[in-house]
Amino acid sequence: MPYFTRKNAKIYFLEQGRGFPVIAIHGLLENSAYWRLPGVTDQLAEEFHVVSMDMRAHGNTRVYGEPAGYDAETVAADIIALADKLGFARFHLLAHSTGGFAAIRHAMKDSSRFASLILTNTGSATAPFPGDADKARKFQEALARAFENYSWKELLAGLRSNPGPFFRGIVESEQSGEMLETVFEMVKQNNRHVVANFVRRFYTDPDPCEDGLSGVDCPTLIIYGEKDDMFIESSRLMARCIPGAQVNEYKGVGHMTAIEAPEKLASDIMAFIRCTAGSSYAAYL
């Protein structure tokens, strides 16, 4: 398995294809399989050099001791370190949900390495319920305890009756059985107790940083599903505040766009990169 070491972390990544580089980072409970299992990275790899990374506390990435780095700044620094290791002076960054928190927070400070930024089902606050710290803390603790107290099989079995804000689109789909199986294959690679620790540490800032969003100066595409109850407003806020940002709403789709609409997502990403990358992309053709 391909890894690189950054201080006390051994970070897993998967490379596919050739061409201009795209780094993909997933969300909570997920790992690089989020992009691979439904075939998004397979489609992108027909045209680009796609690198999917397992975030800290997820998949095959391992952290040994403290500091664990379960925060947006460290995750973003891991992405830049991976780009450095692979010799990517500039790259397109594709980020979903929690990975998007890290991506947009970094882009507010420095987006010079990003040929473009593609944000799916995410927001600029690093806590749910922006502006309501108390509600965010209660949600965060309930989520962490659920991971500690129930197996992945038990948690996923309960989704049909209580899909919550993240699985409504999948449960209401005609292909829900197939999609839930994809989700199970993905999340079972994670350690529930490590993920719970991540949840308690990562989701700490309910401020969406509207002023900071205005400083993002790379081409930006924002995608969200009409059934993604948690991230509709945060996606629209980013679209309003990031200069020149494009926004796509996916009808009939919820939080997990890569699983629910993989072909459309890959097609939209490729079209966006082709239109925005200019000469830096053309040099790889």
Image (spheres, rainbow, N blue to C red):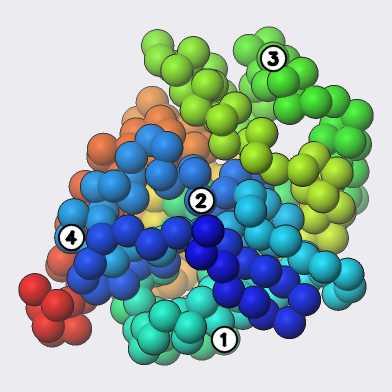
Say what amino acid the circle numbered 2 marks: Ser
Q: Height in image: 117 above or below 280?
A: above
Image mark for residue 109: 1
Image coordinates for residue 222, horizontal then vertical, percent:
40, 57
SS assignment at label 2 = loop
Relative depth, front residue between 18 and 250: 18
Q: Are marks 1 and 3 in contact (CB under 8 Å)?
A: no
- Residue under pointer 2: 32
> Dot 4 corresponds to which residue?
47
Quadrant of the rendered image containing residue 204: bottom right
Sequence-first disc among 3 and 4: 4
Q: Position of residue 74 (x, y in %)?
A: 69, 75
Reading the image, the residue beneath label 3 is: 157
> Secondary structure beneath disc 3?
helix
Label 2 or label 3, whichever lies nearer to me, is 2
Q: Secondary structure at mark 4?
A: loop
Mark toward the start of the polypeptide (2 vs 3): 2
